[in-house]
Image (tube, helix red, strand yellow):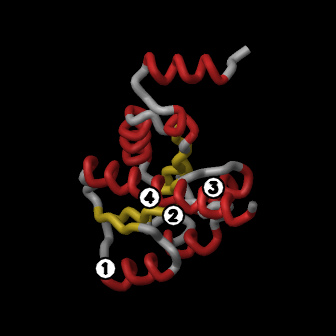
Amino acid sequence: MFIYQDLVYFCLYNNTSANKLYETILVVDDNEGVRKSLTGLLEAEDYTVDTAASGSEAIEKSRKLHYDLALLDIRLPDMEGTRLLKEMEMGKPRMKTIVITGYATLENAVEALNLGADAYLEKPIDQEKLLKIIREKLRERQSEHQKATVEEK
C-alpha cells in the first residue's frame, strides 16, 4: 500500500515536490503534434497532463475531472477558445487558464482576458516563458485556495 512516507521518499529520490505530482494540466489543441509536444514538456516538469482535441471534449473532461490549469488553443474545430472559456467547468478554487494561439489579434486577446483567461500567449511557444507563466499561475491558484480555506474556518 502506498502511504505518505513513500510519497516523500519518491519525491526526494526523484528531486520533485509532492505538490507537483498532484498539479494537473489540461492541454486543449486540435493539433496532435502540439498536444504531444506540450505533454512531453509538462510531464518532464513532473506535472500530470491530460489532453483534449476539441472544445466539446474539454468541456466534458472539465465536468468529470479536476484540473488546476488548462492550456487552450483559441481556434478549435468545434468552437472558439473564447467560447470554451465560458463553458468549461472551472471548479473551486478556479482553474487557471492560459490561451495559446497562432492567430493573435488584439480583439481575441482582449476578449479572452475579459472572459477570465489568466494569460495569453502566441505560437510558436517559448517553452521557458510558458513554464514560467504556468508556475506563476499555479502559485496564484494555491494562494487563492489557502486564502479561501482560511476564510471558511
Residue tagged 1? 105
Q: Position of residue 11 (x, y in %)?
A: 49, 24
Q: Position of residue 65 (x, y in %)?
A: 69, 49
Q: Residues within 10 Å of mark 4 (few under 14, many from 20)?
A: many
SS category of the residue bearing label 4: helix
Residue tagged 3? 57
| Of the image marks 2 and 3, the number of the one nearer the N terminus | 3
| Of the image marks 4 and 3, the number of the one nearer the N terminus | 3
Q: Is residue 135 above or below residue 55?
A: above
Decide: marks 2, 1 in contact (CB < 8 A)?
Answer: no
Q: Residue at x 56, y 62 (%)?
A: 144
Q: Residue at x 73, y 14 (%)?
A: 1
Residue tagged 4? 137
Residue 29 seen by the camera: no
How far is disc 4 from disc 3 in space, using C-alphas?
23 Å
| Of the image marks 4 and 1, the number of the one nearer the N terminus | 1
How far is disc 4 from disc 1 in space, using C-alphas?
23 Å
